[in-house]
Image (tube, rainbow, N blue to C red):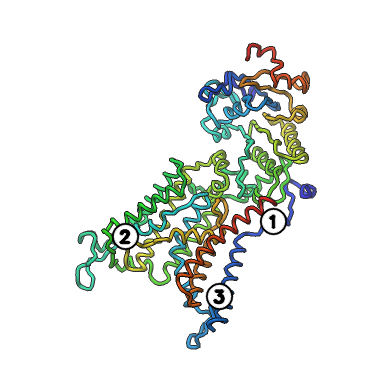
Amino acid sequence: MAQTTHGIGGLAYDPTKRTRPPELNVLAALILIILAFEVLGRMFIGDSFLFNTRENIDTLFNEQRLQIIILQVSIVGIIALGVTQVIITGGIDLSSGSVVGATAMIAMSFAQTAIVNGNPNPKAIFGEGMMDLPVIVPVLVGLGCGLFAGLVNGLLIAYTRIPPFIATLGMMVAARGCAKWWSKGNPISFPTESYAAIGKGMMPVLIFITLAVVFHLIMTQTRYGKHSYAIGSNEQAARMSGINVARHKVLVYAIAGMLAALAAIVLSSKNLTAQAGMGVMYELDAIAMAVIGGVSLQGGRGSIIGTVLGALIFGVIISGFTFLKLDAYYQEMVKGVIIVAAVVLDTWRQNQRGRG
Amino acid sequence: MSEIILETRGLTKHYGGVHALTEADFTLRRGEHVAIMGDNGAGKSTFVRQITGVEKPTRGQIIFDGVEHTFESPIEAREAGIETVFQTLALADDLDVPSNLFLGREKVRFRLGPFSILDKRAMREATMAALVKTGVKIPNLSNTIRNMSGGQRQCVAIARTAAFKSKLVIMDEPTAALGVQETAQVENIIRTLKEAGEPLILISHNMRQVFDLVDRIVVFRRGRIVANLRKEETDGQDVVAYITGAKTGAEYEGAP
């Protein structure tokens, strides 16, 4: 053991043992993918992916495309922040897409305006007294829905010890049923102006970035973050070290549920309507963002920064396919390939370390 | 302060019909290093699980530092001052050294429930101090445990006991999975603890190691203590005789 020879005072510094943060690899992948689209674009359709080629607008980059890239991933990105925490603790959350559906329906019905173009709201769910409520009401109701779903998930997983896959699968089906039952399948529309402002323009991006920063700090600087990694890394050790594992899991799933609910509020506000089918497959997109961003499905490894980069990769790929005028069907197929590739890469990396 | 740090009286554990531990009377003095030996299934680990709060004894008393305790969890035992290095390492592979040392007992700068903000600097410094105290050398504090050898992991687990004001350290086969050099490293740490006057219970199958390190050997057989031997008054062959059942200590006659 060479490293013990030059150690003084308990610390033998060996620079070769330093590990590179895995986020750098994700960032490299992001840049590589952008460059690939740039090259493919110039080769096949004679246009630039990244840069502005229209002469009437005076900007270096194609800002519109960049905005769309981040805007279209920011809502699922909000969900992915919660899913990241769940996966880091060694769990999985399949219910977030359905929670988005149910929350959007319920929150929207508390956000309706009474008069639309001089006529009573044709999609009204409640009577007069429950209309034109202050924006805080639908927001709190919505977050409450997410909190409830998350608590049920967490309590089931922590105390009945059923696998997270099963518990959240049940919630996935049940919440989707709730979304359909709420208004007997009818869409709910015409929110108040203040509710509509939540998801207007680039607001989803702003909310996504703010939350990403907050949860990055929580995961890296607080006891909550440390315990999340510990549980995902070695649950037995976490328990023996005095961490209340059950309570922590309930908290993690509750936060994930509330983030899904927030995504639902932003989404329904942006679309000015809520439908029972909202958020279908969002859970898988969110999981994919996390996995692409280097969050290990075996728990214990990954970061919020990684997930944000994963979300950007996701957005760039979708946008790039549209840019190359490829069929939407290809997008889904390629998305599937990328998710599997990311997991294969993670497993492979793990095996490498096991041997080394 | 009494001379005795740990005493058990009539400590008994039944798992259903299995009598894993029967009427164990055990004492440990301050600064004393005692080895617990015995065949697999003789009750060594069961005994440790009772005094560390991992399990609750069926009956019997545990008197630690002059006070009778009934530990509801390993945390309570740890808070009382019993630090244990478990056979299955209680370390989180994906965390770095300070995080592992302070797992479940993080130093915080700002209390905010689960979102309390960690005092990483204080933990790093306390980690260094603990490593110096135990003589453990680690290549890089901010490396995850995953990248370390078995010996380094074991050292981290042991250094953890030194990071807090423990009154008693228990090690369950700390060198079972280690190579020669790494074993020597762990044994050096144990000697350091001896010089510092820290009492220790060592569970080990390694006769050479036991005679090298401890003052006294307690032998378990079929859930009972069958011998309590001072190192100077016994030898390997003698201990083996007790372990296999060829011999039983005079004061334990009548045991099956």
Which chain letter matches label 2? A
Q: Residues within 10 Å of mark 2 (few under 14, many from 20)?
A: many
Q: Nearer the viewer, mark 1 or mark 3?
A: 3
What element does badge 2 sit on? Answer: helix
Asked if residue A308 lies left or right of residue A28, the reply is left
Residue A194: x and y in percent read 32, 67
Residue wearing tag 1: A18
- Measured in 3D between alpha carbons, the distance from the residue under mark 3 to the one under mark 2, in whole angstroms, is 38 Å
Residue wearing tag 3: A37
Which chain letter matches label 1? A
Q: Nearer the viewer, mark 3 or mark 2?
A: 3
Q: Residue at image x 23%, y 59%?
A: A126
- Measured in 3D between alpha carbons, the distance from the residue under mark 1 to the one under mark 2, in whole angstroms, is 50 Å
How many labels were placed on the picture? 3
Residue wearing tag 2: A105
B255 shown above or below B20: above
- Dividing the picture into quadrants, the one containing residue A258 is bottom left
Residue B243: x and y in percent read 70, 21
Residue type at tag 1: Arg
Residue type at tag 3: Phe
- Dividing the picture into quadrants, the one containing residue A24 is bottom right
